[in-house]
């Protein structure tokens, strides 16, 4: 059992991972500023895990509790220092950090690059400084397949060229570089390197995380109009939006629509658990892994799978290609299977079944009427 700090733990991937980690017997401290999430998600995680959520201040962490929430910003160095110090003072020093907190909207990053670098890069640097000062040198970091830009080969191995094409991707790349520097593996081309500096770091490159916990109690709750395909489709299915816009049917793919590697968020959460356990039981190292299924699905495949899951028609119209999109992005997940003995278990049909259960039970997400 470890004491873990989960930054951004109230968000989409963080909340599902908190549940998996509580079920694995860990004690969690969540730090989130709720800029893109709701505390309701964590209350529901506590319900599902059969525990209670304690709210606390970074300076006041009391008796060790299983699941504690601290509202704060990863850029707030005094808050981070107080959090690490008070966990230590109450006999539960933080053993490892799972770092989800960050901004993730590609289009927004083009409009607000300074904000993306501030939260994603400066925020992570402050977090790493606090970890270093408090002798906590294990981190699982949320990286992204967006680093591969327009991939030269598919399925994409971890050794593929890193070529981010927007400020969001650039900020993830900068953090990956910082982590390699810390681990004493600057410019690391190999996905696994011994860490000369005593850090245990996993850089996990997610493909397209979607779906929800099968209970329908927690799921993805984007602000405003969803940018991403999956939440857009579930909102069409539930009647919140009239139709889907399909960005291009002239891609060099079997049906002409874009192909992605959709990964069930519970598979992804379990991947974090395995990465954490692997780091905690191994020598210091820098691990860089794709987390994806290795299977591609087109936009129209997802539409059909959601129609089957929801038993509702999903109207759509074809529009021009979206600038910045790649035709096909699919992971080569072999290294994660080899290193973590982890592979995805859930199919596209299960992704749609669970995503639909969440959307149907919570048509307005964590908002009105569903607390
Ligand atoms: P999310 O927005 O649902 O979760 C991020 C969480 O971080 C939110 O709860 C938000 O309130 C919190 N947060 C943001 N800024 C913060 C700050 N300054 N201080 C404290 N908390 C802050 O996003 P998600 O989909 O759960 O993504 C989690 C991580 O995974 C992100 O780093 C994201 O870039 C990365 N990622 C996501 C995807 C995806 O498609 N969802 C793909 C690849 C990588
Ligand atoms: N698409 C549509 N209509 C929509 C939304 C998307 O046709 O309304 C299409 C896109 O053109 C693409 C596919 O659906 O072909 C998937 O698009 P998403 O926006 O859902 O996902 P992306 O692959 O573009 O990007 C996502 C995240 C990135 C992350 C990347 C890899 O937005 O942050 O997955 O993890 F980096």
Image (spheres, rainbow, N blue to C red):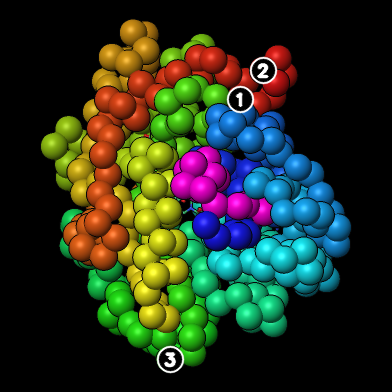
Drawn side of residue 309 relative to residue 133, left or right? left
Disc 1 crowd rating (10 Å Cα; few below 14, some 14-19, many 20+) is many
Start-end of magenta stretch:
17-29
Residue closest to the eye, 36 or 315? 36
Q: Pick whichever of labels 2 and 3 is earlier in the sequence.
A: 3
- Residue under circle 3? 196
Between label 1 and label 2, give the one nearer the viewer.
2
Residue closest to the eye, 295 or 58? 58
Residue 31 drawn at (x, y percent): 70, 54
CA distance separating discs 1 and 3: 45 Å
Disc 3 crowd rating (10 Å Cα; few below 14, some 14-19, many 20+) is few
**In which quarter of the view is residue 114 placed?**
bottom right
Q: Pick whichever of labels 1 and 2 is earlier in the sequence.
A: 1
CA distance separating discs 1 and 2: 8 Å
- Residue under circle 1? 365
Drawn side of residue 190 relative to residue 59, left or right? left
Q: Are marks 1 and 2 in contact (CB under 8 Å)?
A: yes
Q: Is residue 28 magenta?
A: yes
**In which quarter of the view is residue 74 placed?**
bottom right
Q: In the displayed structure, would residue 68 be above or below residue 204? A: above
Q: Is residue 357 magenta?
A: no
CA distance separating discs 2 and 3: 49 Å
Q: In the displayed structure, would residue 167 be above or below residue 359? A: below
Q: Is residue 251 visible?
A: no
Please state the total of marks drawn on the protein image. 3
- Residue under circle 2? 370
Q: Which disc number belongs to residue 268?
A: none
């Amino acid at each position: 059992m470890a004491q873990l700090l989960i930054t951004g733990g109230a968000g989409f991937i963080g909340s599902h991972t908190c549940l998996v980690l509580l079920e694995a017997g860990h004690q969690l401290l969540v730090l989130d500023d709720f800029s893109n999430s709701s505390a309701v998600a964590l209350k529901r995680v506590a319900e599902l895990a059969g525990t209670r959520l304690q709210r606390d201040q970074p300076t006041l962490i009391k008796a060790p509790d299983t699941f504690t929430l601290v509202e704060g910003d990863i850029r707030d160095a005094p808050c981070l220092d107080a959090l690490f110090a008070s966990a230590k003072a109450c006999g539960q020093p933080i053993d490892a950090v799972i770092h989800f907190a960050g901004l993730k909207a590609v289009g927004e990053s083009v409009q607000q690059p300074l904000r993306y670098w501030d939260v994603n890069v400066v925020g992570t640097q402050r977090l790493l400084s606090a970890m270093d000062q408090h002798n906590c040198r294990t981190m699982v970091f949320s990286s992204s397949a967006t680093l591969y830009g327009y991939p030269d080969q598919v399925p994409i191995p971890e050794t593929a060229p890193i070529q981010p094409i927007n400020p969001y991707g650039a900020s993830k790349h900068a953090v990956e570089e910082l982590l390699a520097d810390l681990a004493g593996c600057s410019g690391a081309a190999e996905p696994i390197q011994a860490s000369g500096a005593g850090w245990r770091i996993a850089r996990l490159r997610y493909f397209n995380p979607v779906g929800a916990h099968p209970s329908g109690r927690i799921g993805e709750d984007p602000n405003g109009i969803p940018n991403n395909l999956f939440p857009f489709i579930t909102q069409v299915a539930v009647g919140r939006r009239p139709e889907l816009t399909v960005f291009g049917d002239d891609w060099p793919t079997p049906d002409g629509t874009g192909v992605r590697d959709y990964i069930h968020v519970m598979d992804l959460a379990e991947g974090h658990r395995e990465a954490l356990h692997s780091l905690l039981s191994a020598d210091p190292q820098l691990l860089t892994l794709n987390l994806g299924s290795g299977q591609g699905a087109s936009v129209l495949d997802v539409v059909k799978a959601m129609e089957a899951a929801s038993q509702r028609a999903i109207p759509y119209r074809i529009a021009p290609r979206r600038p910045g999109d790649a035709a096909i992005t699919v992971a080569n997940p072999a290294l994660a299977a080899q290193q973590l003995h982890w592979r995805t278990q859930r199919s596209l049909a299960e992704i749609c079944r669970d995503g639909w259960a969440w959307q149907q039970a919570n048509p307005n997400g964590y908002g009105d009427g569903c607390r």
